[in-house]
Image: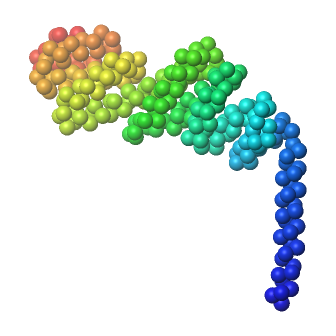
């Protein structure tokens, strides 16, 4: 009985191997644009692994074809769509080095920036990815300011900067709560000096007033309260600062 089964299995394995060889031979006969079009269909159908394989086959079988270059950037984009951001970023890094004059180079820079931008965490977490997004968005804007990618990068840059300012505020509040005033001041001043276009500035100015009053340095407290009152007179943070200074007997200098 065992001998009979063994005889049956062997032809099945042989046929399978032949079928695989036949498929490989058929694959090699595909033109590069056929691989590309099939990869595009697979990507749109969210068959990302299959799409990546087809885009990679263009380079494997037709390395000097213009379709190979298209396949590289589409392979990176498919990885991006699949959430494989590190792989996509690495592919784009290589693409940028090898094809600096390609017509799609602006898109390559932009897509590399998106690989970091899409992973921006909330301010409670480490902001290393946010820093990478900042660097790559700025590079896209610097190189291609008037392109559609440069313009969209400018919009996304605002959110990145706001996230970084939010992280500085979180750390500053941590130090302030623990009465580590110098460390807190450094964080709040960073927001005021480096992230002056963000929504965090009014609070940062108020926190500086708090820090300096807690340290007994009233002239500095009054200075930042004056800046707050001049730039954000209707802000609730200015009202808080004014009350603090009034309580310390220096309210008149805050207006």
Q: Position of residue 135 (x, y in %)?
A: 48, 26
Quadrant of residue 165 within the rendered picture: top left
Q: Quadrant of the N terminus?
A: bottom right
Residue appearing at x 15%, y 23% in the figure: 213
Closest to the observer: 16 or 215?
16
Residue appearing at x 64%, y 31% in the figure: 95
Specify how the rendered protein is coloured.
Answer: rainbow
Q: Position of residue 117 (x, y in %)?
A: 53, 32
Residue appearing at x 87%, y 51% in the figure: 25
Closest to the observer: 251 or 122?
122
Residue most toward the front? Answer: 64
Q: Position of residue 209 (x, y in %)?
A: 21, 21
The number of numbered discs placed on residues in the rendered structure image is 0
From the viewer's perspective, is residue 30 above or below residue 187? below
Q: Quadrant of the C terminus?
A: top left
Using the rendered image of the protein, determine whether residue 39 is visible from the camera's viewpoint: no
Residue appearing at x 86%, y 72% in the figure: 12
Q: Is residue 173 left or right of residue 128?
A: left
Closest to the observer: 156 or 65?
65
Using the rendered image of the protein, determine whether residue 138 is visible from the camera's viewpoint: yes
Closest to the observer: 35 or 127?
35
Q: Position of residue 43 (x, y in %)?
A: 73, 41
Quadrant of residue 65 within the rendered picture: top right
From the viewer's perspective, is residue 128 above or below residue 231? below
């Amino acid at each position: 009985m065992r001998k009979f089964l063994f005889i049956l299995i062997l032809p099945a394995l042989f046929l399978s191997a032949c079928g695989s060889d036949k498929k490989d031979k058929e694959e090699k006969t595909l033109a590069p644009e056929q691989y590309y079009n099939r990869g595009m269909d697979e990507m749109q159908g969210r068959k990302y692994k299959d799409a990546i394989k087809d885009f990679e086959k263009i380079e494997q079988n037709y390395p000097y074809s213009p379709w190979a270059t298209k396949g590289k950037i589409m392979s990176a984009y498919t990885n991006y769509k699949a959430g494989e951001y590190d792989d996509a970023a690495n592919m784009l890094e290589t693409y940028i080095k090898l094809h600096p004059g390609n017509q799609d180079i602006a898109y390559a820079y932009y897509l590399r920036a998106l690989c970091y931008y899409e992973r921006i965490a909330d301010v409670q977490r480490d902001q290393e990815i946010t820093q990478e997004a900042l660097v790559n968005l700025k590079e896209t804007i610097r190189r291609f300011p008037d392109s559609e990618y440069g313009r969209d990068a400018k919009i996304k840059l605002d959110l990145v900067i706001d996230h970084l300012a939010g992280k500085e505020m979180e750390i500053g509040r941590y130090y302030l709560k623990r009465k580590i005033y110098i460390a807190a001041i450094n964080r709040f001043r960073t927001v005021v000096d480096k992230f002056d276009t963000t929504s965090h500035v009014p609070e940062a100015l108020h926190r500086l007033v708090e820090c300096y009053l807690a340290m007994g340095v009233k002239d500095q407290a009054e200075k930042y309260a004056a800046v707050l009152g001049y730039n954000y007179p209707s802000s609730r943070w200015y009202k808080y600062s004014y009350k603090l200074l009034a309580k310390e007997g220096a309210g008149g200098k805050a207006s």
